[in-house]
Amino acid sequence: MPAELRLLSYNVRSLRDDRAALGRVIRGCAPDVVCVQEAPRFFGWRASAARLARETGLLYVTGGAPSCGTMILAAPRLSVAYAEDVTFPRTPGLHRRGLATAVLRLATGARLAVVSCHLSLNAAERYRQGGLLLGRLAELRARGGPAAVVAGDLNDLPGGRTFRLLAGALADAWRQAPEGGGDTFPSAGRDRRIDAVLCTPAVDVLGCGVPRRLPGVRPGDLAAATDHLPLLARLRLPGVP
């Protein structure tokens, strides 16, 4: 029987903004999986990550400092079959980046390979990272099966070289089933689509976009929580034979 879940991709800007608003937004989205970018990664990052998970009713899976600020959180109903933090090669003078990766298992037995990414601001480095990401995804799918999602801050527009590389290999969930806006940055202005949820063919996208009118979320919370808007994807995974 197919299984459905809700995946949220969210750049939280190192929790420097309104923490209470951020917590309300995440809880309002009711996600099963959260792919975080700009997660806490310096002194005290473990305590900050644990607090964010606790405030949103989720569990820490992997990421933070070991993956240069990407992180994965998951609902208690999911179990972790595999998790690994990945760092990209360092480019002198540029901020080091990485991936939080995991294979999550639902009670039905369905598995989903998940990658949280935050790619470089530098175009050449970003394109190299896109290729490395796809290579890592292939390795993760060998462990987790055909259903996989890459979610995060691509720092590239849909017409950009890296966005096109990734969307050529994976399905752009917002393009496939738009449900709400696609522009995610800046949160107050919303004029750029630089965040994305990208899926393998085994994942059925039921809807994806910037969520609005969330329960328990106050007016202004989306702009106050961080400088990015979240992307919420409703996904259906293949059944287990």
Image (tube, helix red, strand yellow):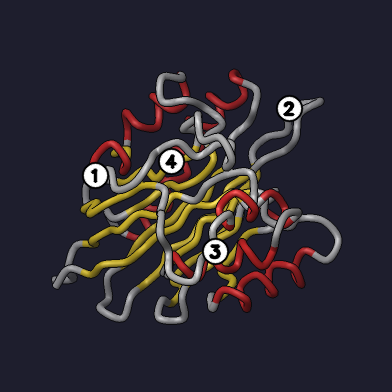
Residue 82 shows in the view: yes
Estimate the spatial distance between the alpha carbons at disc 3 and disc 2, rounded to whole Å. Answer: 41 Å
Task: Residue type at mark 4: give it.
Answer: Ala
Please, which residue is most extreme toward the right here?
Answer: 43
Amino acid type, mark 2: Thr
Image position of 62 (left or right of 182)? right
Residue beneath disc 4: 196
Q: Quadrant of the N terminus?
A: bottom left
Q: Mark 3 or mark 1, which has the lower sequence index?
A: 1
Q: CA separation, marks 3 and 1? A: 26 Å
Query: What label sits on residue 91 in the rendered view?
Result: 2
Question: Are dots 3 and 1 in contact, CB under 8 Å?
Answer: no
Earlier residue among tags 3 and 2: 2
Identify which residue, 169 or 82, lies in the foreground: 169
The residue that disc 1 covers is 177
Q: Circle 3 sits on which residue? A: 218
Q: Residue 90: horizontal and vertical position, in percent?
A: 73, 33
Q: How many marks?
A: 4
- The circle drawn on residue 146 is none
User: Which residue sits at x=63%, y=59%?
Assistant: 63
Q: Residue at x 69, y 64 (%)?
A: 19
Percent of width and height locating residue 111:
32, 66
Instruction: Check disc 4 and report its element: helix, strand or loop.
Output: strand
Q: Earlier in the sequence, mark 2 or mark 4?
A: 2
Earlier residue among tags 1 and 4: 1
- Spatial CA span between label 2 and label 4: 24 Å
Q: Position of residue 194 (x, y in %)?
A: 50, 33
